[in-house]
Amino acid sequence: MNERQLGGVQWSLPYGEGMVRYTIAIALALVGPGFCAPARANDPQSTAPLSSPSPGPDPCGGPGRLLSTANRPTIGYSACAVKDHTAVFELGYQNQVNGTPSAGSVESQVPQNFLRLGIAQRFEIDVIGPNYEATRKYASGRPDMVTNGVADSGLGFKWELPPTGKWTVAFDGLYTGPNGSTFLTAGNATLTGNFDASYSLSTVTSIATTIAVSSTGGYADHVHGQYGTTIPSIVMTTQIPHYYQFYAEYVLVSKIALDRGDRAFTDFGVQKLLGSRIEVDLEYGHAFTGISALRFNYIGAGMVVQLR
């Protein structure tokens, strides 16, 4: 899964243009066929093409449940809580290149750990981190500077409301303490609230949004300060036979650091359900910007494992 400590990763792109695109996308989703619930699937052991069963009472259920409930590899969160009395591990690796070949940085993250524990029907407790990050900064004529450490860890929860037709709605609460390495910690507690909404466009295609509001902190010129950030995202997913799922997501970050402004980007990926308890995925992210210093691209891979 990509970075879950919202505001903790430095993204790039002009926010104003991104906000216009996001607003248009949301408006189209609301006035169109609908907003998204996770796509459902048939028996993952079957090699026959997916059929189109009529919508069931629970868009988050069925043998393809893991594709619906997995958060990774997108930034936005699924509106589906994990199954009660079940543990789900979300793990991954991400490598991001920022700037230009002559001046920039390379950032790596592993294992992007996010543990989800279903303690009751439609309710889960989450364990965030630990997540190891390494950064190599480079510039022509200067020696590379390498830093590495662990990002802040914490706890969270998800509360999924009972489904209404094709709609699924949930709320997340996330807390991380200032317990990471010096160059990665927020320096104060980070509190994040998410609103997740999804709507099934069909039995295999869906569209969803997460709107995250976070109070966090950081350092600028060795001076600590707190700030707020808003992170809306919109994602579309579609399945093809044999339990492959493709997605495309657009994300905005209103403020990425204490001394930095907004960023926006898109990411794409493919997920594959193996049996009913293992999901693997590949992802690619890209910034829409003509400013060389603000460019970034990233690739990632990961898996989701459900116990029981």
Image (cartoon, rainbow, N blue to C red):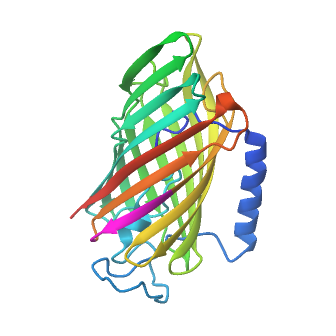
Residue at screen point 78% across, 51% down: 20
Name the side, left or right, on which 276 lies relative to 289.
Answer: left
Furthest residue to the left? 308
Instruction: Give coordinates of residue 205: x percent, y percent.
Output: 55, 74
Instruction: Give coordinates of residue 256: x percent, y percent.
Output: 61, 32
| Quarter of the figure that contains the C terminus | bottom left
Instruction: Give coordinates of residue 218: x percent, y percent.
Output: 55, 22
Q: Quadrant of residue 216?
A: top right
Q: Quadrant of residue 179?
A: top left
274 part of magenta stretch: yes
Residue at screen point 51% across, 60% down: 170
Q: Is residue 243 visible?
A: yes
Residue at screen point 50% across, 53% down: 74
Name the side, left or right, on which 199 lies relative to 306.
Answer: right
Residue at screen point 52% across, 10% down: 142
Q: Quadrant of residue 303?
A: bottom left
| Residues in magenta, as a range | 269-275
